[in-house]
Amino acid sequence: MGRRQRNSRDGKLRVLFLIRVADGAEQRFLAAYEAIRHQVARVPGHLLDQVCQSTEDSRQWLITSEWESAEHFLAWERSPEHREMVKPMRDCLEQRESLRFHVVRET
């Protein structure tokens, strides 16, 4: 009840972007995120995103996004517009790791 199951290759994709912001660049990072978040929200297939800060390390952040499909996300990620749009944010980072997961079940 309340659970939806789907083939792991069909449907939504969740992207986790684990990042470490350079010392002193936190406000610049947030300003860069704020400057692009509404543009990203208009990208075809984008459903939502969140930016989260670690409770234990103020320089550790997580950006999560959800997409209608892997194809939507990959088309966006590979586009020149994506690279240009996220450059100011990436310039604030010391480390980054991108993880992708197919949404298999949700409640």
Image (cartoon, rainbow, N blue to C red):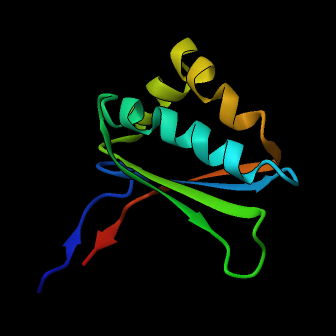
Which image quarter is the C terminus in? bottom left
Which residue is farthest left?
1
Residue at 78% x, 40% y: name it.
92
Q: Is residue 82 left or right of residue 43?
A: right
Quadrant housing residue 104: bottom left
Is residue 71 in view from this perspective?
A: no
Q: Nearer the viewer, residue 89 or 96?
A: 89
Please say if 27 is above or below 31: below
Q: Is residue 82 left or right of residue 67?
A: right
Which image quarter is the N terminus in? bottom left
Is residue 70 in view from this perspective?
A: yes
Q: Is residue 71 left or right of residue 34?
A: left
Please say if 20 is above or below 29: below
Which residue is farthest top?
80
Q: Nearer the viewer, residue 33 or 73?
A: 33
Quadrant housing residue 84: top right
Residue at 61% x, 29% y: name it.
86
Q: Position of residue 74 (x, y in %)?
A: 49, 30
Residue at 52% x, 15% y: name it.
81
Q: Is residue 106 left or right of residue 58?
A: left
Count of residue discs? 0
